[in-house]
Amino acid sequence: MSQPVITEEWRKIPGFDLIYEVSNFGEVRSWGPNARGRTLKTRKDRDGFPTVRMKCSDGRMRVRRVHLLVAKAFPEEES
């Protein structure tokens, strides 16, 4: 019996400019002025969680944990 195929879905990250997206597989990409998506490199923080550096609208760089970005972009629907 074959398993269902799960496709990668991308959504904009709430709270950041519209140039960042996160996938349901935990990938984060940025969109530049030339409209080419670039996957951001991840690093592990001191607790072992994958993180990415993202630029805020005020120009400052922020480090965010990837699993929290996924949780914000893909909230579970309440039944």
Image (cartoon, rainbow, N blue to C red):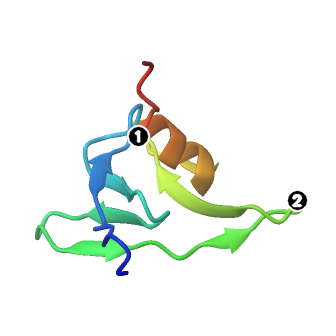
Label 1, residues with CA under 10 Å away: few <14, some 14-19, many ≥20: some
Q: Residue at x 56, y 60 (%)?
A: 53
What residue would you read off at disc 1?
A: 73
Q: Residue at x 42, y 18 (%)?
A: 79
Coordinates of residue 46 in the picture (x, y in percent): 88, 62
Q: In the depicted view, which residue is nearer to us: 59 or 14?
A: 14
- Contact check, label 2 and label 1, Cβ < 8 Å: no
Tag 1 secondary structure: helix
**What's the residue type where badge 1 is placed?**
Ala
Q: In the depicted view, which residue is nearer to us: 74 or 6?
A: 6
Numbered tag placed on residue 52 in the rendering = none
Q: What is the CA distance from the residue labelled 2 to the residue labelled 1?
A: 22 Å
Q: Name the residue furthest front.
A: 1
Residue 44 visible at all? yes
Q: Quadrant of residue 24?
A: bottom left
**Tag count in the figure?**
2
Label 2, residues with CA under 10 Å away: few <14, some 14-19, many ≥20: few
**What's the residue type where badge 2 is placed?**
Asp
Specify whether 47 is left or right of 44: right
Q: Is residue 6 above or below residue 78?
A: below
Numbered tag placed on residue 47 in the rendering = 2
